[in-house]
Image (tube, helix red, strand yellow):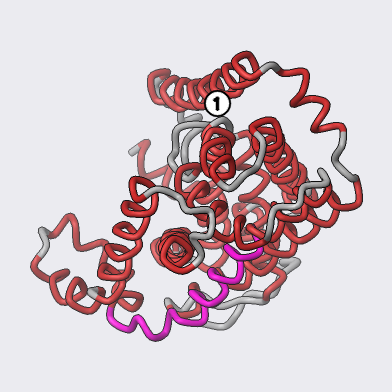
């Protein structure tokens, strides 16, 4: 009886649903561990290599180049919103670009503060799913958006390791990078075969069938993949700009090689936004290309600062975008609902 009343009341129910404390403790513990691990790695680097030269190096950064790198990264996030819109349309979730842009930046901002590994991705999926009444499709589009970004990253890193290894990185680094890229390519090309296996899965696992359009027709993903590759290249250019701001003379090709490989390492969900992992990767990779260790660590810290600064711009979308519950219950929505 009580459960049926709660269902009828929907989001306006006054009966609180209080989760058990253990459900909240683990995400915050994981979040704290990620921050602590990242800070520990950075602290160890600063202590081992003497923080004073690194801080002096940070002080050399030209504000104009830093602003240009942050602006280019911001433009990349706008382009990522459009990529997400393309992927959602494949599953029949359509809407104006402004809607996807707002939800995407809500996710970008949420990722800065919400504990857990995929807080921001879950937030934008919930916003989109509630808006259109297609929660499964919304989550599938977000997963595809994140997955294609990783595919492009792996492919670019492998391509750079094969054709742009002017820094003569050892095979112990380039070899696994190429292998990961080839495995990612094989997985992409094998999508149609995986789609045929979905009906053979246990009933509980067949929920993945919502993503079948992505697997059955990989060609439809090519525009989104193209945007992903452009984004990954722009990230290397961003960090090349930061290097110019420090007065470094390292060539752009070095960053096209090292940044994707470093981003593969930083993409591991071990620390907050790759803090510490990226700096360590830069220390090794850029060091092999002739960049001084103080400059390499400073570049990693500058990039972390730029990404955090851009993430804070999502506060505008977070504050001004109506919540999914309000949108779903209001007849006078700020964003018109598409006709189904």
Residue in the foreground of this view, choosing between 60 and 327: 60
Task: State yes or no: residue 291 in magenta.
Answer: no
Give the residue displayed 75% in from the left and 66% down from the top: 334
Q: How would you classify the magenta stretch by its main secondary structure?
A: helix
Q: Is residue 290 above or below residue 188?
A: above
Give the residue displayed 51% in from the left and 65% down from the top: 164
Q: Is residue 213 above or below residue 113?
A: below
Residue in the foreground of this view, choosing between 200 and 127: 200
Q: Secondary structure at mark 1?
A: helix
Callout count: 1
Q: Is residue 206 above or below residue 283?
A: below
Q: Which residue is mark 1?
A: 38
Q: Which residues are magenta?
A: 216-235
Give the residue displayed 57% in from the left and 17% down from the top: 44
331 horizontally vs 126: left or right: right
Q: Residue 179's spot in the image, x, y percent?
A: 29, 58
């Amino acid at each position: 009886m009580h459960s049926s009343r709660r269902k009828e009341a929907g989001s306006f129910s006054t009966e609180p649903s209080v989760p058990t404390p253990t459900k909240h403790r683990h995400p915050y513990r994981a979040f704290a561990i990620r921050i602590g691990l990242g800070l520990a790695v950075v602290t160890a680097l600063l202590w081992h290599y003497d923080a004073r030269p690194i801080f002096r190096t940070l002080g050399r950064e030209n504000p104009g180049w830093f602003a240009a790198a942050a602006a280019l990264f911001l433009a990349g996030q706008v382009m990522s919103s459009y990529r997400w819109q393309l992927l959602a349309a494949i599953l029949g979730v359509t809407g104006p670009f402004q809607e996807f842009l707002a939800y995407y930046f809500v996710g970008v901002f949420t990722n800065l503060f919400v504990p857990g590994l995929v807080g921001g991705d879950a937030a934008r999926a919930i916003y989109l799913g509630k808006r259109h009444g297609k929660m499964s499709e919304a989550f599938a589009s977000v997963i595809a958006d994140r997955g294609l970004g990783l595919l492009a990253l792996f492919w670019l890193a492998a391509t750079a390791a094969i054709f742009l290894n002017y820094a003569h990185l050892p095979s112990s680094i380039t070899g696994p990078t190429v292998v990961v890229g080839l495995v990612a390519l094989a997985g992409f090309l094998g999508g149609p075969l995986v789609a045929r296996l979905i009906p053979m899965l246990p009933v509980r696992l067949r929920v993945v069938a919502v993503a079948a359009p992505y697997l059955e027709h990989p060609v439809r993903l090519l525009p989104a993949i193209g945007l992903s590759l452009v984004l990954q290249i722009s990230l290397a250019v961003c960090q090349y700009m930061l290097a110019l701001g420090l007065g470094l003379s390292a060539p752009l090709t070095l960053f096209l090689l090292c940044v994707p490989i470093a981003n593969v390492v930083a993409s591991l969900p071990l620390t907050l936004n790759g803090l510490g992992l990226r700096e360590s990767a830069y220390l090794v990779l850029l060091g092999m290309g002739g960049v001084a260790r103080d400059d390499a660590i400073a570049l990693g810290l500058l990039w972390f600062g730029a990404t955090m600064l851009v993430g804070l711009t999502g506060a505008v979308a977070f504050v001004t975008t109506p919540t999914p519950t309000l949108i779903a219950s209001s007849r006078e929505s700020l964003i018109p609902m598409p006709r189904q």
